[in-house]
Image: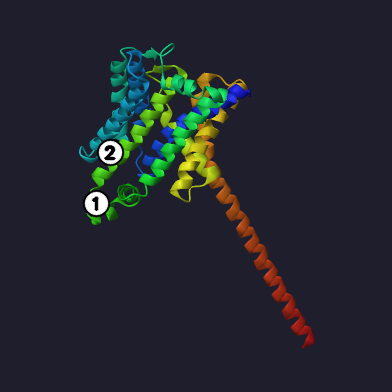
Amino acid sequence: MSATAFIGSIESGFIFAIMALGVYLTFRILDFPDLTVDGSFATGGALSATMIAAGLAPFVSTIAALFAGLLVGALTGILHTKGKINALLSGILSMIALYSINLRIMGKANVPLLGDDTLMSQIKDVTAALGDYGTLVAVAIIAFVIKFISDYFLHTEVGLSIRATGNNARMIRSFSTNTDNTIILGLSISNGLVALSGSLYAQYQGFADVSMGIGMIIIGLASVIIGEAIFGDKSIKRATFAVIGGAIIYRLVVAIAMQVGLAPSDMKLMTALIVIVALIMPRLSSWYKEKKRRTERRKNRMASQEHVGIEQGEVKRHA
């Protein structure tokens, strides 16, 4: 792999890490299978690209994408909590609706940003002294700032309520906490991060596409699962760090696969296989360790029985 491809993989890994942090918030913290991600990622990219192409400031466009994601997540939460729609189905409905909404926002299937001033081009100008590493340093700082903010938020009273809702909603309701509000807030923040990631990625690759969000939920889950398997998740701080690491590792694996000749059309299949392997490996590891422990116990039991038999034989001979 060339140095340029390696750096590019890490840069995109940090951008996808922001999306993966949003997925972590719903799937791990809130225990909510939110499929809105595929739509809200594209919404962030579509809105920011359209606003930038119209001449608005890139920073304002990026913040607008963040707020659009917050709104989309809140709507999914309202469908589930107030409309009493199944969690999985509410996310699917939002995702389907967002496809048409994103087309309306862009007015066409693709909005190019070539030649337009974007947040990424501004970052390159500011970090010109760092050369090829300027964008990498900038997106890494953004990802880790969001990680630290997330860590702090999840230890606040509201954050603890969201964690408690995901862990045991019935118990937290007994303490007079409105779990509907915590679910709506959690989904809102999650999709806000996803849309922010989509906005940054559209500006990074130089265009927004209506289908750019397809499969993002799988990529987010792959990042979470790979990160937890490698770095662990014993605490919130460690888990969020693992999510960032998992996103980078995922992008590096994808880049290596492309280098060895895998067709771009096969990337979704490879992503699914990565998730399957990441899910199965911890189970296989636990099974192997348990088998090894049972073998050790059996050996110790047989050795103990043999020792007792020897002692009984010695007693008989002396008698």
In this rendering, the answer to whether 106 lies above or below 127 is above
Question: To which quarter of the image does residue 257 belong?
Answer: top right
Circle 1: is it few (<14), some (14-19), or many (20+) Cα within 10 Å? some
Q: Quadrant of the N terminus?
A: top right
Asked where in the image residue 77 lies, by quadrant, the reply is top left
Left or right: 44, with 114 as reference point: left
Q: Secondary structure at mark 2?
A: loop
Question: Which residue is outermost to the bottom?
Answer: 319
Picture residue at 75% right of the left edge, 79% below the top? 313
Looking at the picture, tell me which residue is in the foreground, 121 or 261: 121
Q: Residue at x 56, y 23 (%)?
A: 131
Could you tell which of marks 2 and 1 lies nearer the N-terminus?
2
Are discs 2 and 1 less than 8 Å apart at CB? no
Q: Is residue 247 above or below residue 165?
A: above
Can residue 28 be seen in this snapshot? no
Provide residue 308's location: percent of width, then percent of height: 70, 76
Vertical placement of residue 245 versus 53, above or below: below
- What residue occupies the far left of the structure in this picture? 82
Residue 211 in the image, given as x and y percentages of width and height? 39, 20
Residue marked by disc 1: 177
Please give the name of the residue rendered at 39% of the width and 36% of the height, measured from the top-left corner: 22
Which circle marks residue 86 in the picture? 2
Judge whether 185 appears above or below 194 on screen: below
- Give the residue at the far right of this rendering: 317
**Residue 210 x/y as whole percent:** 37, 18
Dot 1 falls on a residue whose secondary structure is: loop
Mark 1 is on which residue type?
Answer: Thr
Q: Quadrant of residue 33?
A: top left
The amino acid on which the numbered mark 2 sits, given as a three-letter code, is: Asn
Drawn side of residue 216 relative to residue 265, left or right: left
Q: Residues within 10 Å of mark 2 (few under 14, many from 20)?
A: few
